[in-house]
Amino acid sequence: MSAYVPHPEDHFTFGLWTVGNIGRDPFGDPVRAPIAPARIVQQLAKLGAYGVNLHDNDLVPRDATPAERDRIVRDFKQVLADTGMKVPMATTNLFGDPVFRDGAFTSNDARVRAYALKRTMSAIDLGVELGAATYVFWGGREGTDTSAAKDPRDGIKWYRDAINYLCDYVRAQQYDLRFAIEPKPNEPRGDIFLPTIGHALAFVYTLDHPEMVGLNPELAHDTMAGLEFSHGVGQALDAGKLFHIDLNAQKPGRFDQDLRFGSEDVKGAFFLVKLLEDARWTGMRHFDSHAYRTEDEQGVWDFAAGSMRTYLILEDKVARFNADAEIQGLLNDLRSRGGADSPERFSAEGAQTLKDRAFDLDAMRATGYAYEKLDQLTMEILLGVR
């Protein structure tokens, strides 16, 4: 049991909005009282978390005066110092205020787009003041409910203009800050711009400062789109653009559930943990999820502890997978089929050699890959019988 106790060096983080979720849904009122940010920090520190992340108004109310803002931030920084907790990531709530009903950076109303920039610059200042090194953009309202309302070319242009503007702001302020775009296919808008990891990656390379901008993919969002999350994360890693990640769980074909990490599709969660750990990725393991609506405050802390514990259990399963002689034997057999048979670089001489080469297609067609056995052995690792 003690082997699965989290420690700050595991880089587990939660949002103030995740453990602070009050259990409201579209059909029901809140079931839990709000938890003060200071208490969230203190309790997560006791559970072994590394830090907390926040939207601007998770900490500072929208209508706070400058004096109130400074007092709130001062007191919060003291709690961080007392507990040793960090704020690795910050973001802006550009979806809750009715002013953003048609989007923030992509609203048809230029006044709204300007206000969104103003609010984001202030929120960036707050995030940097608290020590954030990554700033996430989730475009929850950046999209359409009817395609008659907006030319998608305009939406993408406005989105690009906003990110370029904010990159220049960060550079002018000499902040040490990177941006991460969080894709999502839909909800709350009918269709959201930059719906998948691939869309967001393509968008990044159209920016003025692509080196400053990467991705914050979320497990639930890719599952909503029917995608294999670890493949998208692998593509982001390959591109050097995995700046942050949101861990949770999701049943396919449902609304955005934000379930506790590993509570659905254990095999998918396993291969995600394997990818991150085998890659020795040093970023934050952020749990963007919340406790069931059935829970009281104790259930919230059980949820937070369970999220981290599950990751550590799966990390142990990864180590067992990587050390299993039979599994590694199968994988080595697969690797042995590689060699120099498939040329990596083109040359005229090599191309001619390849064109002249004779392949034993009958033998190639008859050879299996033993994936059934490999998958069964994986399941036995996960089910604890290996």
Image (cartoon, rainbow, N blue to C red):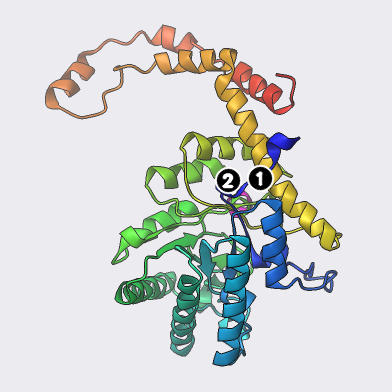
In-front residue for pair 242/128:
128
Residue on which the image places disc 2: 10
Regarding mark 2 in the picture, which secondary structure is present there?
Answer: helix
* Residue 98 painted magenta: no
Q: Residues within 10 Å of mark 1 (few under 14, many from 20)?
A: some
Q: Which residues are magenta?
A: 221-227
Relative placement, left or right, of 276 versus 317 is: left
Rendered-image quadrant of the N terminus: top right
Q: Which mark is residue 6?
A: 1
- Seen as rendered, the residue at the extreme left is 349
Above or below 186: residue 37: below
Q: Is residue 255 left or right of residue 125?
A: right
Give percent across and percent down for residue 350. 17, 21
Query: Looking at the picture, does residue 286 appear above or below residue 133?
Result: above
Can the viewer see residue 105 in this picture?
no
Q: Is residue 224 magenta?
A: yes
Task: Single out the residue that lies furthest toward the front.
Answer: 82
Query: What numbered label is drawn on residue 310?
Result: none
Pointer 1 and pointer 2: residues touching (CB < 8 Å)? Answer: yes
Quarter location, residue 3: top right
Q: Residue at x 65, y 42 (%)?
A: 311
Q: Nearer the viewer, residue 144 or 23?
A: 23
* Residue 324 rendering spot, x and y as whole percentages: 59, 17
Left or right of 173 in this view: 81: right
Secondary structure state at the residue bearing disc 1: loop
Q: Amino acid at mark 2?
A: Asp
Q: Is residue 174 above or below residue 331?
A: below
- Image coordinates of residue 4 in percent, x first then y, are 69, 38
Q: Amino acid at mark 1?
A: Pro
Work out whether residue 104 or residue 79 is closer to the camera in this orientation and state it.
Answer: 79
> Crowdedness of circle 2 by 10 Å Cα count: few (<14), some, many (20+)?
some
State which quarter of the image contains the C terminus. top right
